[in-house]
Amino acid sequence: MKSEKRVIVALDVESADEARSVIGEVRDEAGAFKIGLQLFTAAGPEFVREVAIKHRVFLDLKFHDIPNTVAKAGIEAARMGVWMFNVHASGGSEMMREAVSALHFACERENLKRPLMIGVTVLTSSDTNALRETGIERAADDQVVHLAQLAAECRLDGVVSSPLEVSAVRRGVANPGFLIVTPGVRPEFATNDDQKRVMTPRQATAVGSDYLVIGRPILRAENRVDALRRIYEEINAVD
């Protein structure tokens, strides 16, 4: 995998115009673009379709609801043309299995390209103490592996995981094609912001991350292309 294809640029901005500006600057270097809750709420599905025509889109809405609702949401994501979307693995096996099945049949029926479906394990802003507040007694790293194994059993294509748990997920999930998408990546030149479980791009790829989701270190840079290229240099240091 070429290093530049590992970087998913997070479009965590307030408007479609801001997002178009970022895309215009880094489109030749970015492997994909993430559209999350903020931008989706501001710009809506039409903007997702617009970007998906020319670029790979990771729709990061973290679906978590009753099985039927999540299944239908996944079908709508496919209709928008996204490359990948996610659901909360903590929604359970029934929710994930129904979403996978519904997506498969809808894409066959409507001749749609099937997007990748990945499961969110534990948010990188959470730690063991935060989990205990919600009644989860497992340590954060143990919970990540547990949910990754559950997602794999439900035939999801991969998971979202902090880089600190990537090695454990690789050991815990036998499927070598199981994708690991990693937020909480901070280049050596950036700060951690609100992320608690972080690594550098060099470290994350070394332990087995397939894709790195990086936002603020690129978005806030004076020269975004230069920031992205510096990230590539870090990744290439382990190739």
Image (cartoon, rainbow, N blue to C red):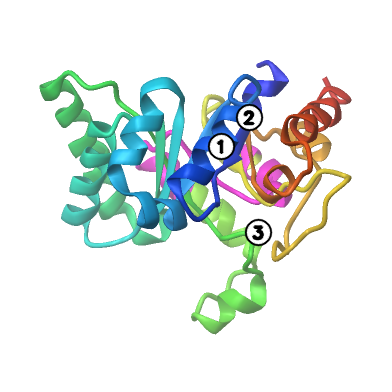
Compared to residue 136, the image places residue 221 above or below, namely above
Label 1 secondary element: helix
Q: Is residue 135 visible?
A: yes
Answer with mark 2 or mark 3, whichever residue precedes in sequence: 2
Helix, strand or loop status at disc 3: helix
Reply above or below: 171 against 29: below
- When asked about the image quadrant of residue 46, the answer is top left
Foreground: 146 or 78?
Answer: 78
Q: Residues within 10 Å of mark 2 (few under 14, many from 20)?
A: some
Cα–Cα span, label 1 and label 2: 6 Å
**Pointer 1 with pointer 3, Cβ within 8 A:** no
Q: Position of residue 156 (x, y in %)?
A: 39, 38
Q: Which residue is mark 1?
A: 21
Residue segment shown in magenta: 149-170
Query: The N terminus appears in which quarter of the rendering?
Result: top right
Task: Check contact, mark 1 vs mark 2: CB within 8 A.
Answer: yes
What is the quadrant of residue 132 in the picture? bottom right
Indicate the amino acid at tag 2.
Answer: Glu
Give the camera-side residue of 168 and 179.
179
The answer to whether residue 77 is left or right of residue 12 is: left
Residue 161 inside the magenta-drawn segment: yes
* Residue 64 appears left or right of 147: left
Q: Residues within 10 Å of mark 3 (few under 14, many from 20)?
A: some
Observer-side mark, 2 or 3, equals 2
The label number, if any, that marks residue 141 in the structure image: 3
Tell me: 19 left or right of 40.
right
Residue at horizontal 16%, vertical 53%? 68
> Which of the two residues, 61 or 38, is positioned nearer the viewer here?
38
Is 77 a magenta residue?
no
| Residue to which mark 2 is pinned | 25
